[in-house]
């Protein structure tokens, strides 16, 4: 049995858990006495890929064994996005995406910590004793053995183990909670997307790579040429993909085919990074609705055209290419 098969087995068992709402705690100021006592894991969980899912499903099982809620701590923005946004890796998933996946895995609580300069200045000791022990009352902690924390990143796994012995909580590495020889990582998913290998990305994620969000009003240029689009802001420092794609679109549990552009729309001097998707044979109003767009195949890179008419001609070619890819795949 290979890594992916083992991972899918864990994922299937996790999905057999009865789905229930995950309690979302936004910010440390919303922690209450009722939140003390938990099995905690801390990480970015970007993409919530099969490696993450293997860890999380076992965290959930450990919490059940101890009779405690399972809690996942993430940071928004991610530390690199605060300190070095230009070098930060492309974001695979936003907080809402993570929430959806954690719910499917049976996680009880999602604690989203605002990562700002004030939080970054917290000492390693205060992070452990003030947050983990006093506020969260952790009994069992799962983190990567390369996890660093506290001002100047002086806190490490060894410090957590030492403090755990003193404060009576157990600490284990995610290495103990993941698939043996598993080579799945967020970086590997990003590389697959960069190489336009969406099948490999899907294998590592356990689902197609999607971009989801609420449809916003755009400049409505597309409808003037017979190609109305649903527009979704990417809300990322950097997107993991860019260009024109054949896609499938989910709207209120219904599925459609379409063609999407992901980028800055250079021909019309676009300033925002966004997704624009034209859904084939679809005329309903989507403004304000939540949609999910799965990438199937890349058609071309985003490019700037000398005129809107040339862009129109290319869109017609892109739509035909997308239909060929989608209806013959």
Image (tube, rainbow, N blue to C red):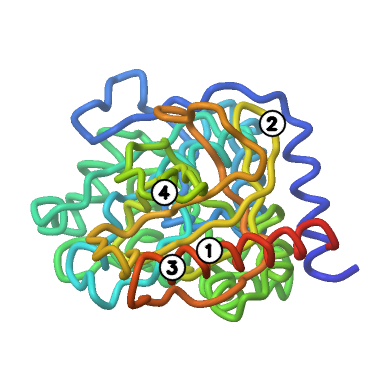
Tell me the tag on residue 311.
3
Please report the residue visible at 27 percent of the width from the left and 43 percent of the height from the top.
113
Q: How far apart are marks 4 and 2 (CA)?
A: 22 Å
Q: Earlier in the sequence, mark 1 or mark 2?
A: 2
CB of mark 1 within 8 Å of CB of mark 3?
Answer: yes
Q: Circle 2 sits on which residue?
A: 254
Lateral position of residue 213 relative to residue 75, left or right? right
Dot in front, 4 or 2: 2
**Residue 158, position as x, y percentages in the image:** 38, 68
Q: Residues within 10 Å of mark 4 (few under 14, many from 20)?
A: some
Please report the residue visible at 36 percent of the width from the left and 25 percent of the height from the top.
35
Please report the residue visible at 39 percent of the width from the left and 52 percent of the height from the top.
165
Dot in front, 4 or 3: 3
Q: Circle 4 sits on which residue?
A: 94
Q: Earlier in the sequence, mark 4 or mark 3?
A: 4
Q: Distance between the residues labelled 1 and 3?
A: 6 Å
Q: In which quarter of the image is residue 86?
A: bottom left
Dot in front, 4 or 1: 1
Tell me the tag on residue 315.
1
Q: Distance between the residues labelled 1 and 2?
A: 25 Å
**Which image quarter holds the C terminus?**
bottom right
């Amino acid at each position: 049995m290979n890594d992916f098969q083992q991972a899918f087995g864990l994922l299937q068992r996790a999905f057999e858990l009865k789905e229930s709402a995950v309690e979302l705690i936004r910010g440390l100021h919303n922690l209450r006495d009722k939140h003390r006592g938990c099995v905690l894991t801390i990480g970015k969980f970007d993409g919530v890929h099969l490696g993450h899912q293997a860890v999380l499903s076992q965290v959930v099982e450990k919490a059940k064994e101890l009779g405690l809620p399972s809690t996942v701590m993430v940071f928004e923005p991610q530390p690199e996005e605060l300190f070095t946004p230009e070098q930060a890796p492309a974001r695979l998933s936003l907080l809402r995406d993570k929430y959806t996946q954690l719910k499917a895995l049976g996680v009880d609580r999602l604690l989203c910590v605002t990562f700002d300069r004030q939080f970054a200045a917290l000492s390693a000791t205060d992070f452990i004793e003030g947050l983990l022990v006093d506020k969260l009352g952790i009994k069992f902690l799962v983190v990567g053995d390369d996890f660093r924390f506290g001002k100047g990143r002086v806190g490490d796994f060894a410090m957590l183990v030492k403090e755990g012995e003193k404060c009576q909580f157990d600490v284990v590495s995610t290495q103990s909670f993941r698939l043996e020889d598993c080579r799945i990582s967020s970086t590997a998913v990003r590389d697959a997307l960069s190489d336009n290998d969406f099948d490999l990305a899907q294998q590592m994620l356990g689902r197609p790579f999607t971009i989801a969000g609420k449809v916003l009003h755009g400049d409505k240029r597309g409808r003037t040429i017979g190609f109305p689009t649903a527009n979704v802001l990417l809300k990322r420092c950097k997107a993991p993909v860019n260009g024109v794609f054949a896609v499938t679109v989910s709207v209120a549990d219904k599925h459609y085919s379409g063609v999407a552009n992901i980028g800055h729309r250079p021909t019309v001097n676009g300033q925002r990074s966004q997704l624009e998707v034209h859904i084939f044979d679809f005329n309903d109003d989507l403004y304000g609705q939540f949609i999910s767009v799965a990438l199937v195949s890349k058609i071309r890179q985003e490019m700037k055209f000398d005129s809107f008419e040339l862009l129109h001609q290319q869109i017609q070619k892109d739509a035909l290419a997308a239909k060929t890819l989608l209806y013959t795949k």
